[in-house]
Amino acid sequence: MVVIGLGVGGEEVGGRLAAAGLDVVGIEGRLVGGECPYWGCIPTKMMIRGANLLAEARRVPGLAGSATVTPDWGPVAARIRDEATDDWNDKVAVDRFTGKGGRFVRGRGVLAGPRRVRVNDDEYAARRGVVLATGTAPSPPPVEGLAGTPFWTNREAVEVKTLPASLVILGGGAIGVELAQVFARFGVAVTVVERSDRLVAVEEPEASELAATALRGDGITVHTGATTQRVAYSEEGFVVSLSDGTTLRAEKLLVAAGRRAELDTLGLDTVGLDPSARSVATDEWMRAGDGLWAVGDLTGHGAFTHMAMYEADVAVRDILGQGGPPADYRAVPRVTFTDPEIGSVGLTEKQARDAGRAVTVGTAQIPASSRGWIHKVGNEGFIKLVAADGVLVGATSAGPTGGEVLAALTVAIAARVPVRQLRHTIWAYPTFHRALGDALRELG
Ligand SMILES: Cc1cc2nc3c(=O)[nH]c(=O)nc-3n(C[C@H](O)[C@H](O)[C@H](O)COP(=O)(O)OP(=O)(O)OC[C@H]3O[C@@H](n4cnc5c(N)ncnc54)[C@H](O)[C@@H]3O)c2cc1C
Ligand SMILES: NC(=O)c1ccc[n+]([C@@H]2O[C@H](COP(=O)([O-])OP(=O)(O)OC[C@H]3O[C@@H](n4cnc5c(N)ncnc54)[C@H](O)[C@@H]3O)[C@@H](O)[C@H]2O)c1
């Protein structure tokens, strides 16, 4: 086998196939492990951990005495270097892969025909096949003046050692809102510019509203429905002009306006696939063609580490002929790690209605629950359930532990637990997840 891209998905596929005794060549252009450990999930969640500690300390007055909070980015930057990324060195990860029997090649792999891959000046012919796992890269929007300026992507934002005084963020999706809150809580003057009419627009409208309220509560200026007309850069920093006449000035500019799979340079045409496509289409066994599999971000099923791991598992079982269930995307969970956390799984109410389902909805507010009331400051959040044909088809769990509460909802959707059974389930008192019972009672 040849695996192109040893990020989250590729390392899992390549490592497991090598450990099973197959002859595996793994090709990686940057760092083995991919975006998640070096510039994604792990370092950003370390940043969020620091930011949330500051926010909790600021909540001490009125509940537990007084606290003097002095933010310092130093420990966060050090932890990212020392504990998360080894200063962006992947020796440990490369050794992990070769230790399982894989052959590692550093370079950019390109398909050169069915079961053939070119990398550096070599060409590899795979007897079994090729796995594509090349992920996604930041995709800056076509805004006049932006190209050529030293704007940040998530990579520079994670690598920052000294915080700027001010920051404009283009994009209010998952990256934009998570990092906006982090930097604001460390004292940066942050402005978020979002093109669509709400933040985290893939989520329920109630979640977008909650995110906007939370960000504004952290002193962040939020512009939604905003068109960025022009970006200019000089020694004094960035000037971002919006089409409504607003001019924003900031020391740094973070572009978090989406990511895309770089498929045009992957040689897809040599295996009969469209190099201008946004994603690589697969069947339910992650097969993209004869002797060709694709896993992770580039399949377009959801750009999450747990999705890359899930698809890697399906592909490995298919390649090794181990059987088990094929890919099922009914219960894909996702968590945006703002404070409050916004977890969701399955369909939104609108998606379910647009699919022609006869939908019922139930909601409960976390502050109105016993635990929310006890928690007091920082208790914002809600549960929203979307049901059709007697089972849940979608749910949102937002709150101080929104991502954790989501687990029960993911199981309910994945296992098609009947709503009538959920209604008669005992939810421990006084937990945040007990609000599920309230939302179930509201379900029409
Ligand atoms: C800031 C940020 C925060 C995130 N937070 C979360 C989170 O909290 N939870 C979550 O679930 N997900 C999160 N994600 C998403 C998560 O990082 C991705 O979904 C995950 O990394 C996808 O894994 P992958 O294997 O598909 O791609 P990647 O991890 O991107 O790996 C692809 C690898 O392929 C390599 N490559 C590309 N082209 C070639 C080529 N031609 N030849 C050789 N190598 C190549 C790349 O260098 C890369 O190492 C976050 C992402 C970002 C950017
Ligand atoms: N907690 C998590 O699981 C997590 C965290 C971060 C990232 N991720 C993954 O990484 C992916 C990429 O994150 P992202 O936030 O870059 O993308 P995104 O697609 O989630 O959000 C991008 C946002 O930018 C907006 N936008 C696009 N062009 C714009 C412009 N010119 N001006 C202003 N706004 C503009 C879009 O409307 C959208 O809301 C996510 O989809 C997610 O799957 C996951």
Image (cartoon, rainbow, N blue to C red):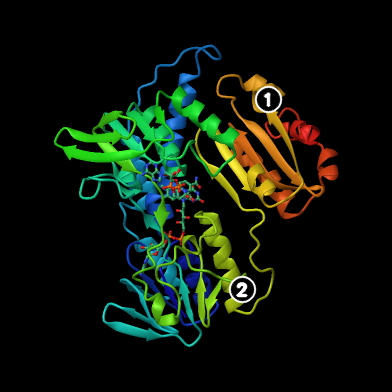
Q: Which residue is mark 1?
A: 371
Q: Amino acid at mark 2?
A: Arg
Label 1: element kind:
helix
Where residue 380 sits: x, y (%)? Answer: 59, 26
> Height in image: 397 above or below 323?
above
Q: Nearer the viewer, residue 352 or 6?
A: 352
Q: Residue furthest left?
A: 235
Residue 317 numbered mark, or none: 2
Q: Going by the image, does 19 lie left or right of 259?
A: right
> Height in image: 33 above or below 252?
below
Residue 175 sits in quarter:
top left
Where residue 163 sits: x, y (%)? Answer: 28, 34
Q: Nearer the viewer, residue 164 or 404?
A: 164
> Height in image: 119 above or below 145?
below
Q: Going by the image, does 263 lie left or right of 207?
A: left
Q: Amino acid at mark 1?
A: Arg
Q: Going by the image, does 241 lie left or right of 281?
A: left
Q: Residue at x 65, y 23 (%)?
A: 367
